[in-house]
């Protein structure tokens, strides 16, 4: 009994000490928000593989991202070992639609043998954004991997800050999302300013688009391009609602809306109503700001794309870039029918859009950006082979800064403080440490893309063509990617001039590998 009298207070004191440490530490948002209890999650995660192997699920059964995919992102973000041992556990032989990348025995690009070489290599876009249309502020994006549009309001302030700081470290672009340019976007990362249907951040007191305010925003921040959001993969042709309870003073100031009132995003733009007026607005924005201007859209009916490209070909007006979002893309909240069944998956949607441009000889004048689960090396490689010049990553970047795929984005109860406006939960996310993880993730994805390009015998992922990928039809059949989507032999690549320029640039950036000095026999 005497022992018990001393043991209980000691145990309580020990638990209090651990809880205090959890509250003060900044490495793990879950433990910071839920001291002691949060540790159970990491314990379960540690023994998760064994539990799944014998009781629950396999490494490739979870969605939207499998355990293997999330493990790769987490390990990459933390600069831990992101290799996998004992061979693939994917069911390659019996999975129709599985992509296989075809390496070359003798290619003009020779991968360096040092495993760590290339971690910090630049991997710029193969095209100069805005150059084809002579935009005053045309530029070559420094990174083919960039951060997709995720608004402040959907994400917490600390999450946006972490991503922006990470973009600055990694040298990539950060899309603001349609929620306006907040103070959290002003931490060094260069920006793509997204214009949604409500024109947040550049609207007048009546909710109308205000060109003067847009020019002020562009002048006061490192905005490199403008993106007109027509729709997104998980919520096409819908507007949005931010409930009054979430409209804080910060969000109100960023968006230019009243505090504490429902914030409604219309389902359509007021500045244009068809392709002709859309192109007029694109040219107005480009002329007034000097910036490249593009559009973002999911893909459904192709009449829009046909009319758009016909007008671009016939009138000389046009967009500088096109971001195609797949139906597998994510959003903070959407009706189940839209997340599951509206808009085409990325590959089918993108290839139809690309073909529409290519048939009118416009594909070399436009920078194509892919979005929708393309933050994984295999998916991104196929996207580049199909004609993407860059990829925009969203949920994968969220995973890198602490998201655990709790799928609570729509409830405002995200346990790691990523997708919430709850001040207590958001405080658990430390932007300083998470920004480094976001940067590590982007750099690792770029590294893997460069390495797979070199394995295919080329200097840059944008030079991987559709013949370098085959799609399995099962155990005994496969089809070249070009034939799967009906591409012509020259489709999917930049122009000859752009190919030569990026190959020369990459030859300077990424040292070529090789072997030992040939033996006398080989020299003879």
Image (cartoon, helix red, strand yellow):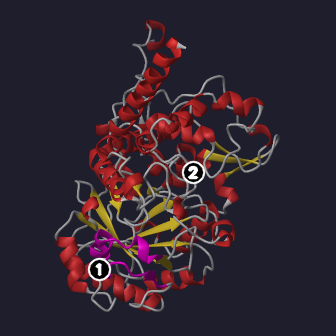
In the image, the segment drawn in magenta is 242-266
Q: Residue at x 49, y 77 (%)?
A: 240
Determine if the magenta segment contains residue 245: yes
The quadrant in which residue 282 appears is bottom left
Q: Secondary structure at mark 2?
A: loop
Near mark 2 (Cα within 10 A), the count class, few <14, some 14-19 or many ≥20, is: few
Q: Mark 1 to mark 2: distance in Å?
A: 31 Å
Q: Residue at x 20, y 78 (%)?
A: 215
Q: Residue furthest right?
A: 476
Q: Position of residue 441 (x, y in %)?
A: 42, 41
Total of numbered circles in the picture?
A: 2
Residue 85's place in the image compared with 330, above or below, is above
Task: Describe residue 110's horizontal placement relative to residue 472 as left or right.
Answer: left
Neighbourhood count class around disc 1 (C-alpha, 10 Å): few under 14, some 14–19, many 20 upward = many
Residue 116 screen position, x and y as percent: 39, 26
Tell me if 173 is positioned left or right of 82 in this view.
Answer: left
Q: In the figure, 518 relative to 366: above or below? A: above
* Residue underneath mark 1: 256
**In the image, what residue occupies the spot 62% across and 76% down?**
300
- The residue nearer to you, when weighing 245 against 182, is 245
Q: Is residue 385 magenta?
A: no
Helix, strand or loop under label 1: loop
Q: Which residue is mark 2?
A: 406
Q: Is residue 383 left or right of residue 9?
A: right
- Apparent side of residue 212 relative to residue 420 in the rendered image (left or right): left
């Amino acid at each position: 009994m005497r022992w018990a009298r001393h043991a209980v207070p000691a145990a309580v004191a020990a638990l209090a000490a651990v809880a205090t440490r959890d509250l003060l530490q900044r490495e793990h948002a879950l433990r910071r928000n839920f001291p002691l209890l949060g540790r159970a999650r990491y314990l379960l995660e540690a023994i998760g593989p064994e539990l799944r192997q014998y009781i629950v699920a396999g490494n490739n059964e979870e969605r939207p991202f499998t355990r293997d995919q999330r493990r790769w992102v987490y390990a990459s973000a933390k600069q831990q070992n992101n290799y996998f041992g004992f061979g693939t556990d994917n069911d390659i032989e019996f999975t129709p639609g599985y992509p296989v990348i075809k390496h070359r025995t003798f290619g003009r690009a020779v991968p360096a043998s040092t495993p760590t070489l290339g971690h910090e290599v630049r991997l710029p876009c193969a095209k100069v954004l805005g150059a084809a249309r002579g935009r005053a502020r045309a530029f070559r994006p420094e990174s083919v991997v960039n951060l997709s549009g995720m608004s402040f309001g959907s994400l917490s302030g600390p999450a946006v800050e972490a991503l922006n700081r990470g973009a600055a470290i990694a040298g990539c672009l950060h899309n603001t999302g349609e929620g306006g340019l907040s103070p959290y976007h002003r931490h060094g990362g260069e920006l793509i300013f997204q214009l949604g249907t409500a024109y947040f951040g550049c609207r007048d007191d009546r909710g109308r688009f205000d060109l003067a305010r847009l020019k002020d925003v562009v002048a006061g921040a490192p905005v490199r391009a403008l993106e007109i959001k027509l729709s997104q993969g998980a919520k096409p042709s819908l507007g949005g609602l931010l409930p009054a309870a979430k409209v804080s003073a910060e969000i109100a100031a960023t968006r230019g809306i009243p505090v504490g009132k429902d914030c409604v995003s219309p389902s359509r733009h007021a500045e244009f109503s068809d392709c002709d007026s859309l192109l007029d607005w694109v040219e107005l924005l480009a002329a007034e700001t000097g910036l490249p201007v593009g559009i973002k859209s999911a893909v459904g009916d192709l009449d829009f794309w046909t009319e758009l490209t016909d007008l671009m070909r016939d009138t000389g007006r046009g967009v500088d870039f096109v971001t195609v979002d797949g139906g597998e893309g994510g959003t903070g909240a959407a009706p189940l029918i839209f997340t599951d069944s509206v808009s085409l998956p990325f590959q089918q949607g993108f290839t139809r859009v690309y073909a529409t441009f290519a048939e009118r000889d416009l594909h070399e004048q436009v920078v194509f950006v892919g979005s929708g689960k393309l933050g994984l090396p295999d998916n991104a490689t196929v996207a580049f082979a199909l004609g993407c010049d860059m990829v925009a990553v969203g949920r994968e970047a969220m995973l890198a800064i602490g998201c655990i795929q709790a799928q609570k984005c729509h409830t405002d109860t995200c346990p790691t403080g990523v997708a919430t406006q709850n001040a207590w939960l958001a405080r658990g996310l430390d932007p300083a440490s998470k920004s480094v993880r976001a940067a590590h993730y982007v750099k690792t994805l770029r590294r893997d893309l460069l390495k797979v390009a070199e394995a295919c015998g080329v200097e840059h992922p944008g030079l991987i063509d559709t013949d370098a990928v085959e799609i399995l039809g099962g155990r005994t059949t496969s089809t070249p990617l070009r034939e799967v989507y009906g591409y012509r032999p020259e489709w999917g690549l930049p122009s000859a001039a752009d190919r030569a320029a990026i190959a020369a640039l990459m030859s300077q950036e990424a040292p070529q590998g090789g072997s030992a000095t040939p033996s006398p026999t080989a020299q003879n």
